[in-house]
Amino acid sequence: MLWSVPLGFVSVVCLVVVLDHIDDRVRLAVTRLGLALFGDYVETADGAERQRRRMHAAHVGVTHRVYASRTLLYSTLFGVVGSVLGVYLAAGVVSALSVSADEIRASLPAALSFLGDLATLPSLALGELFGLLLFASATVGTVLAVGSYWGRWLYLDQLAVARAGAIEATLPRTVAFVYALSRSGMSVPNVLATLVDNRTVYGAAADEVNVAVRDMDAFGTDVLTALRRVARRTPSEQLGEFAENLASVLSSGRNLSTFLHGQYERYQEEARAQQEQYLELLATFAEVYVTVLVAGPLFFITTLVVVGLVIQDTLGIVRFVSYVAIPLGTAGLVVYVDSVTPTPGSGDGRHFVDRPTDGARRFAPDGGAVSGTSTANEASTANHQRLRAYDRLRPLRRWFDDPWGTAFSRPTRSLALTVPLGLLWVVWRVDWSVRSSLARFDLAAVLDAVDEPLVQAMIFVLGVFALAYEVRKRRLRTMEAAVPDFLDRMASVNEAGVTVVQSLQRVARSDLGGLTPEVERAWRDVRWGADAETALRRMAARTSSPTVARAVTLVTNAMRATDDVAPVLRIAADEAQASWRLRRERRTEMVTYLLVIYISFFVFLGIVAALSVSFLPAVEATQTVGGGSATGSLPTGSVFGGIGDVDTDAYRLLFFHASVVQAVCSGLVAGQLGEESVADGVKHGVVLLVVAYAAFLVV
């Protein structure tokens, strides 16, 4: 039993590492241990300043002393774990190679008997065995220690790269926000503070500016120093250049509006150029997918099937390609495309909430008010409990009040109903005679029994989700397409000397397409006593549209600074129009590659169906001849001599499964490449899945 004690120690260390990312108490204990062991060393170590810059770029929420100490502690722990595992690994190799040469020769053909001396390990002396175990322990331990140390710092570099991409994706709209509010007469510090207050709308660039605002608010730093600090620590070269240039303009006294207008135009041009490069990259990904994950597996499966049906059984390899290689390859491509996709990082507009203005308060879980006042009596406590129960049941009540509206507003909620129904359908339709096959681990028989009801359930579940998602997306698209027109009309009316409230009244009477009902509701809020800012914010919350949220944020903040909001409205309209134009150009460009993916799947399905309809029946006829049921027989030793042992039904079943897997994978890739989201690919997957299922029903 003593041999298992080191393994127990390794298990405890690994458990501590896992709990460190889950439990706060374990994390605190690990941090304290790391600081006690390495806290003084990391402060004066070489490269500490460079490590701090990497942490600033990655926006890590702990100090350098804590992170570096934890990194060294992790490296030490993994080094110990690797040393222990290295000993066990070396012992296992020695045990495996301790077979005598005579035993190895007896198990090998005579022509390979010389391998008996090469594959065995001679007897080792105690010193030699100790040296071998020590070498293995040191090697594995060093690799894990160094790998864990560099891995944690390289992880920060990857976070910094991801943050830089997100910052640069949101920078054009952030510059537009700063430009618009500066035109309204607001000072630069107030503009930056307002931007940070709305960082859920403006994303990663606003999060980075939050560093400057925090320095100004908490430490009394002037705006020039704060901007220059942002320029030094940000991982985005574009934001660093903008912050440095903005500080220079403020210090020199040059015209701020002219500078910001030039920066706004520049970033709009860069956004268009970046989209062209990104579309070229997506085109390359589409070609790679069609070549590697559609044409490649099709050629491979066809070749293996011919070989398996004629010469030697290859059913296991074809199953691996169909069930493992294609899904894993598709998942890897989708994840990689998503990682290189520009991430705007903006909110969805749901952060606009109606704060209570009638004295209502939120209550803490223990029944007391958040503000610290205690309940007066038992009746008040009972009321508080009723309010908490009402809040907990509110989502369920909304679902029962308006199930279709809830499903269309949050398409993922439809899965809570459709998945159980789909599972019940599978249980009801499955042939329960496969239980004996399951007991015998006959996977082919089990799949043959459950595949058809499972595909039907998948079509139902994914179809409902795709319908809800597409309805919501089209609703948002029609509203976002009308946002530039809405802002332009508001600006035109305001330029004529009309107030914002009157401008909203006049615009509400016009036709704004999909945005008309929401603008009418906003004007109705104003007529019933709400101010224009509250009405617009409620409109943004109802639409849950990032474009509407950005426009409303810009307009409402400009309204606080000045009554002449027409210039701000013009800038907001231009920004919304530019964003809409870029999205429309992307959809237009990617239609070609969507068609390529569809055509490649149809080619895949056509060849697989042809194999099922023509090739497999011919093989079955040949099996009948070879089995003696016909007048002839296959010659002994012929290349087709093993054809009678092939299970053609298993290949036919595998063709159906491969088509189903390829349909779902092609649909998801089509959505990721063509419409920037895997959720957009669900509808393509449903269409291709229905086509594949119908094709095999016919054949």
Image (cartoon, rainbow, N blue to C red):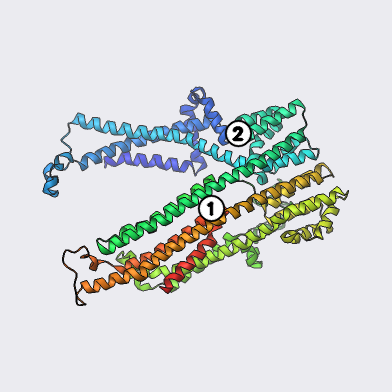
406 or 111, nearer to the observer: 111
Q: Give the x, y percent position of residue 240.
A: 63, 32
311 shown above or below 632: above
Q: Give the x, y percent position of residue 666.
A: 48, 58
Q: Residue furthest right?
A: 497
Residue for point 73% across, 59% down: 515
Q: Quadrant of residue 169?
A: top right
271 or 389, nearer to the observer: 271
Amino acid type, residue under disc 1 in the picture: Leu
374 left or right of 624 in image: right
What is the CA distance from the residue labelled 2 to the residue labelled 1? 27 Å
Q: Which residue is mark 1?
A: 673
Residue 224 in view, yes or no:
yes
234 left or right of 312 in image: right
Are the residues flagged by discs 2 and 1 in contact, CB closer than 8 Å?
no
Residue for point 66% across, 67% down: 401
Residue for point 48% across, 68% down: 691
Q: Earlier in the sequence, mark 2 or mark 1?
A: 2
435 or 167, nearer to the observer: 167
256 left or right of 14 in image: right
44 left or right of 532 in image: left
For residue 237, the mark is 2
Q: Secondary structure at mark 1?
A: helix
Q: Quadrant of the N terminus?
A: top left
Amino acid type, residue under disc 2 in the picture: Glu
75 shown above or below 463: above
293 shown above or below 464: above
Q: Give the x, y percent position of residue 135.
A: 28, 31
Q: Secondary structure at mark 2?
A: helix
Q: Give the x, y percent position of residue 656.
A: 40, 66
Q: Quadrant of the C terminus?
A: bottom left
